[in-house]
Amino acid sequence: MKLRYILLFCALFILATSTVMPVDLYQLEKNRFVTKEESLELPLDPGSRVIISSAVHLSGELKVTTEKAEGILFEYKKILKVGSESEAADYAALIDVDIMRTSDGVKLLLQAPNPAPWAGTDDAGMIEAELHLPGDCDVEVYADYFDVTMVGPFRSVENRSALGRQEIQNVTERLAVSGSGRDIRLKDIRGNISVGSNNADIRIENMISETKPAHISNENGDIIMEAVRGAFTIDGSYGKIRIDGAELKGGISRITGSQCPIRLTIRDMTESALTIADDYEDVELYVNKAVSAVFSLQVESGGEVHVTRIPVRPITVASNYLEFVTGKGGPAIDIDVGGGGNIRIKGIR
């Protein structure tokens, strides 16, 4: 019995005198603190599936890169926007990061309470991180309030509900991204492509979509594309659409605009057709003089059609409709502009 009381006393003494390990904090500026950098590692094969999942009340910056490695390396710091160091330490202790294995890869968890104590206030709990992966992984991001920068090669990338900025480069097979309020910038992408946005701009450089038309949509923002090959379906409104250096190959490419000026430069067309429909704004089409096609151009009353610097053979000429052939004929280019908008076709070398 005496031994039992001694053990109980020792346990109570240890509990009473134990303390939580302090969090290493540094003040970046007024009301802004940062923890020391931490890291997590785990073996991972190339081509694995990687899921990044964040708690709803976390935000921050996430950089994802690939390299010749035999595993995953996650390096991160916690950023606390709060009035005092003691509160920052409390917030930091509530944020946790973990990696768990799945049947086909890994899942990276960025965790915080729901609701978090900073929710609905000017305070914030954030993570600033770099994720290093082997090449050709399939990456899925569920971190709505993070700015995401990714440089592959990745086999596929999916980030469908982003409210932060997205910059993604070098995707080889599949890309599905959408966002709101922050720009999306894409480079060196190919395969099955779907991109959507509103109240922000979409900028794409070097896109290849020869097996299936890429789908790009934006509302209240611009769509700017350069060096695209294949087919696409583009929907835009209340912004502008600019496509330079297009090589149309396979299937039908479609552009639909609403109060959205459209300018497209076609370098080549191979077994492909093009349809453009727009309202209240002009459509400008610059076509390589060597392109052979059948043009059908239609405007409403008040609109005009202008064709310059390209040899044509007229088929039908009317006040609001013009049909003609360039070269040997072949693919169809149909443009229909309503609401008094104009069509301008210009040949280029």
Image (cartoon, helix red, strand yellow):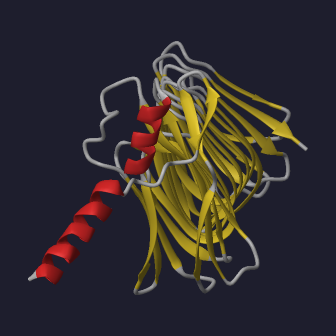
Quadrant where the N terminus lies?
A: bottom left
Q: Does 317 sit above or below residue 18?
A: above
User: Residue at position x 30%, y 28% from top?
Assistant: 120
Can residue 90 be seen from the camera position used here? yes
User: Residue at position x 48%, y 16% from top?
Assistant: 301
Residue closer to the observer: 191 or 181: 181
Q: Where's residue 129, x and y in %?
A: 60, 53
Q: How many labels sit on residues?
A: 0
Residue closer to the observer: 180 or 127: 127
Residue closer to the observer: 239 or 150: 150
Q: Residue furthest top?
A: 302
Q: Residue furthest right?
A: 349
Q: Residue furthest front?
A: 2
Can residue 147 be seen from the camera position used here? no
Q: Where's residue 284, x and y in %?
A: 68, 30
Q: Where's residue 138, x and y in %?
A: 54, 73
Q: Where's residue 61, x and y in %?
A: 58, 45
Quadrant where the C terminus lies?
A: top right
User: Residue at position x 48%, y 37% from top?
Assistant: 218
Using the rendered view, name the quadrant where residue 121 is placed: top left
